[in-house]
Each structure stands twice: as structure tokens, then as C-alpha cells.
């Protein structure tokens, strides 16, 4: 059975991080962009991180430039933008593709596990969010218009779960 622990992610410096580091935690994986109408969601994502971070929760941000060229910066520019404008404390990964032949394997898996409207696997825009439970499985997919604060109840529910696959 595949879980988040079976994947790795590139960090902005080009090194790889095993996502098994997040085994047993609740994760909200988000494709982000700095020049998008939804960019202000960084603020809500940071609020979730600060509220639940000590309770085995983390946001993982994956910058993506596939939607309207709204993430044109390099890793340093993206990190500086997030730090200066939103004081983000959650991990920021390297810029990736979330659709197409070059889609990041983690996103390919999450899209297959939690299709969008009408069964579509394609991510439609920036700030699509995937909630992953303690057991490492995708619990739910949220669209770009779903504000981070609207996910609070689902995060609380997952944090109470034991992580067993039969929960």
C-alpha cells in the first residue's frame, strides 16, 4: 500500500528529503504560487501551521509555475517572498510540476487517490490542497477556493486519529 512515506521531495537547495520524515503526522500538501489571486492563502496556511504544528501537523508547500506563470521566481526569490510577506515557518519545497508527463510523483499519487470534481485527476489551479492523515493516506482534496481556515475541523479530526489504516 502506498503512503506519503514512500515518496521524497526536492528541497530548494536541490537535495532530497524523504517524506517518511512525516510518517505519523497530519500533512497538508499544497501547490503554491507567489503571484496568484489565491496567494493570500499563505497567511491562512501559516495560521494552521502555528495552531497545529506542535500537534504533529505540517503544511508542505510545493511552488508550481504551471498556472499562468504565477510562480516565476527561483528558490531563493520564492523563499524570500514567503518569509517577508507571510512569515512562513512551514517547509517550502523546490518548484515542481503537478500536471503532465513531468508531474511530481507525490502529486500524481495524491491526484489518483483523491480526484477532483467529476473524477478529474488534473489539478486546475494554484493552491489545490491535499490532507494526508496520520496513516499516510490522502484523506481529502480541496480546491483553490477552499480557504485554509475551512479545513480546521478536518485537521482536528485527523490529529485525533491513531494512524491505523482501519480507523
Image: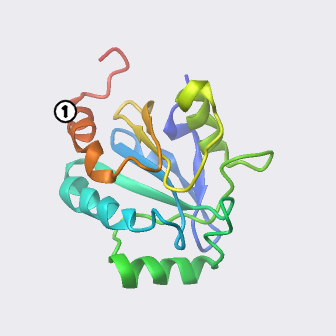
Q: Is residue 54 above or below residue 119?
A: below
153 or 23, nearer to the observer: 153
Q: Give coordinates of residue 111: x percent, y percent.
A: 59, 35
Secondary structure of residue under mark 1: helix
Residue 2 visible? The answer is: no
Residue name at image x 43 percent, y 76 percent? 82
Quarter-of-image position of residue 69: bottom right
- Relative height, residue 32 to residue 73 (above, below): above
- Tell me residue 101's x, y (percent): 80, 45
- Where residue 152 sits: x, y (%)? 23, 44
Residue named by callout 1: 160
Image quarter (top left, top right, bottom left or bottom right) of the N terminus? top right
Quarter of the image with the C terminus in it: top left
Q: Residues within 10 Å of mark 1 (few under 14, many from 20)?
A: few
Q: Is residue 57 left or right of residue 69?
A: left
Q: Is residue 110 above or below residue 30?
A: above
Amino acid at each position: 500500500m502506498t503512503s506519503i512515506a514512500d515518496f521524497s521531495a526536492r528541497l530548494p537547495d536541490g537535495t532530497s528529503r524523504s517524506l517518511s520524515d512525516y510518517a505519523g503526522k497530519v500533512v497538508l500538501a499544497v501547490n503554491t504560487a507567489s503571484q496568484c489571486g489565491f496567494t493570500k492563502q499563505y497567511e491562512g496556511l501559516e495560521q494552521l501551521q502555528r495552531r497545529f504544528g506542535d500537534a504533529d501537523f505540517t503544511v508542505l508547500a510545493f511552488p508550481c509555475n504551471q498556472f499562468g506563470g504565477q510562480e516565476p521566481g527561483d528558490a531563493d526569490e520564492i523563499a524570500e517572498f514567503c518569509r517577508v510577506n507571510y512569515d512562513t515557518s512551514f517547509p517550502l519545497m523546490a518548484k515542481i510540476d503537478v500536471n503532465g508527463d513531468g508531474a511530481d510523483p507525490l502529486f500524481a499519487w495524491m491526484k489518483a487517490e483523491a480526484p477532483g470534481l467529476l473524477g478529474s485527476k488534473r489539478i486546475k489551479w494554484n493552491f489545490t490542497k491535499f490532507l494526508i492523515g496520520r496513516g499516510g493516506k490522502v484523506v481529502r482534496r480541496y480546491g483553490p477556493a477552499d480557504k485554509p481556515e475551512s479545513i480546521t475541523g478536518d485537521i482536528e479530526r485527523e490529529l485525533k486519529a491513531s494512524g491505523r489504516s482501519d480507523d
